Amino acid sequence: MNFEAIVIGVSSGGMNVMKIMFSLLPKEFSIPIIIVQHMSAHSDGEWIKILNDKSGLNMKEADEKEKIGKGNVYIAPPNYHLLIERDKTFSLTIDERVNFARPSIDVLFESAAEAYKNKLIGIVLTGSNNDGTKGIKRIQECGGLTIIQNPETAESAYMPRSAISVIQPDYILSLQEIIKLLIKLDKQ
């Protein structure tokens, strides 16, 4: 199976998780990664620079109408919902908050599920609300691969537990196991 995109939802504890993930993913990793990290509406993007220094991958904020390209990591900009259109480009909206968040993980996941169907990998990581639960369910309904961080290994277990309460994911793994699996899937 050739996957065309990975969507990741992360909240509390996310910076630590992403520092580890992006220091361990090889620079030749080709599946595009799209991330919603809950953050302040006034975030200056400095944390993306920090992650870029740790990673061999090209990390950037997603732009309106930008075409999703291999080998890139896209981050939802602060205070915008990030959606994926059927033509595999981004849309940014300032619609109402979902689960008290903008950007919302559910909004990204649900639009990605429609765009990529069974060519999508959805991942729910550490977090302290239930954002991502509806979205990961939609990814599964559309035939995508679902991965949830083992709540026992998450800095904040609430978000992974919430997702597991709604679906039987393909995988429940520690962060290190998720990284190994992604590298394996990228090489297929």
Image: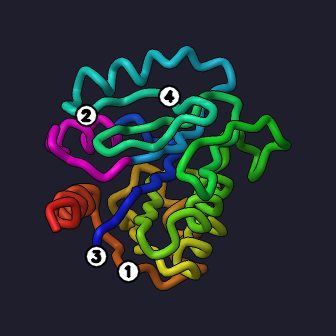
Q: Earlier in the sequence, mark 3 or mark 2?
A: 3
Judged from the image, the secondary structure of the residue bearing numbered disc 4 is: strand
What's the CA distance linking mark 1 and mark 4?
Answer: 29 Å
* Nearer mark to the viewer, of 3 and 1: 3
Question: Dot 2 surroundings within 10 Å: few (below 14), some, or many (20 or more)?
Answer: many
- x then y, percent, for residue 35: 48, 44
Residue 150 % position (x, y):
36, 67
- In the image, 68 versus 179, the foreground residue is 68
Instruction: Kindly identify the amino acid type of the residue bearing the numbered disc 4.
Output: Glu
Q: Is residue 55 above or below residue 136?
A: above
Q: Which residue is mark 3?
A: 1
Kindly report the distance in space between the C-alpha atoms of the residues bearing marks 3 and 2: 23 Å
Depicted 184 relative to depicted 47: above or below:
below
Q: Which residue is mark 1?
A: 170
Compare marks 1 and 2 and give the one earlier in the sequence: 2
Mark 1 and mark 2: Cα distance apart in space: 26 Å
Badges 3 and 2: C-beta atoms under 8 Å apart? no
**Hey, what amino acid is under mark 2?**
Leu
The residue identified by callout 4 is: 61
Asked if the magenta segment contains residue 19, the reply would be yes
Three-letter amino acid code of the residue under disc 1: Asp
What residue is drawn where x is 70% and y is 34%? 80
Rendered residue at 22%/66% (across/down):
185
Front one among 159 and 88: 88
The count of marks equals 4
Identified by mark 3, the residue type is: Met
> Tag 3's secondary structure?
loop
Rendered position, 182 above or below 55: below
Judged left or right of residue 4, residue 98 is right
